[in-house]
Amino acid sequence: MFFGEFEHAVDDKGRVAIPSKFRPKLAEGLVITRGLDGCLFVYPMQDWERLAERIAALPTTQAGVRQFQRLIFSGAADCQLDAQGRIVLPGGLREYAGIERDAVVIGVHTRLEVWARTRWADQRARVEQEGDLIAEQLSSLGI
C-alpha cells in the first residue's frame, strides 16, 4: 500500500527520486501515464496489467470510454527504477502535468501520483476546504 507525501526535485534529465519506502513494490517494473486532475499516475507493473485489462474490456461503443482509453494508454511508458531509485519522467508527461523542477510524489493506496508542487498545493487546499462536503458524499457510499 502506498501512502504519504514527499517533495523531490526533478533533475536536468527529467529524473525524479521515488521514496525509498515505495521502491520494493516497484522493483519488478512500473508504468507511468497521464493521470486525472493534472498529475501523473505510477503503477507497479502487476497492478498496471490488471487495470489495463479492465480498461481494455470497457465497451468502445461509448465515446467516454474511448477517450479515457486514449488518455491512459497513449501516454503510458514502462520504466525501471535506476540504481539510485529514480525514474525518468518522459517529456510529454512532464509537460502534461506541468512538472518542471519541483515535484511531489504521493501515495494513493495502489498507485503513486506525481504532481507539480504548485498544482499539488492547489489541489490539497481545495480538498482540505471541501473536506466536510466530501465526507458527507462518501457517507452515502458506506465510508
Image (cartoon, rainbow, N blue to C red):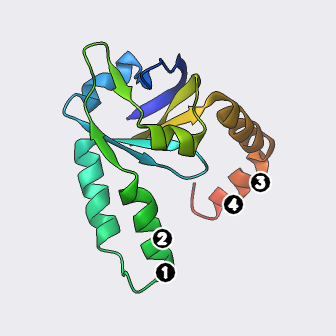
User: Which of disc 4 and disc 2 is earlier in sequence?
Assistant: 2
Q: Which residue is painted at 71% across and 53% down in the image?
A: 134
Q: Which mark is nearer the camera, 2 or 3?
A: 2
**SS of the residue under disc 3:** helix
- Disc 1 marks which amino acid? Ala
| Residue indicated by mark 3 | 133
Q: Dividing the picture into quarters, in which one does residue 24 lie? A: top left
Q: What's the distance in space between the residues labelled 4 and 1, CA to CA? A: 27 Å
Q: Which of marks 2 and 4 is in front?
A: 2
Secondary structure at badge 1 equals: helix
Disc 2 to disc 4, C-alpha distance: 27 Å
The answer for how far apart the CA atoms under marks 2 and 3 are is 29 Å
Question: Label 2 is placed on what type of residue?
Answer: Gln
Q: Does residue 52 sit above or below 42 in this rendering? A: below
Disc 2 target residue: 67
* Mark 2 / mark 3, whichever is N-terminal: 2
Return the residue at label 4.
137
In this view, the residue farthest toward the top is 84
Residue 8 vs residue 108, the one in the foreground: 8
For label 1, the residue is 63
Q: Does 16 sit above or below residue 134?
A: above
Label 4, residues with CA under 10 Å away: few <14, some 14-19, many ≥20 = few
Is there a contact, CB below 8 Å, between mark 1 and mark 2? yes
Query: Is the Cβ of the residue at disc 4 closer than 8 Å to that at disc 3?
Result: yes
Q: In terms of sequence position, does the residue under pointer 3 or pointer 1 come before the other?
A: 1
Which residue is painted at 57% across and 35% down in the image? Answer: 115
Question: Is tag 4's residue or tag 1's residue first in the polypeptide sequence?
Answer: 1
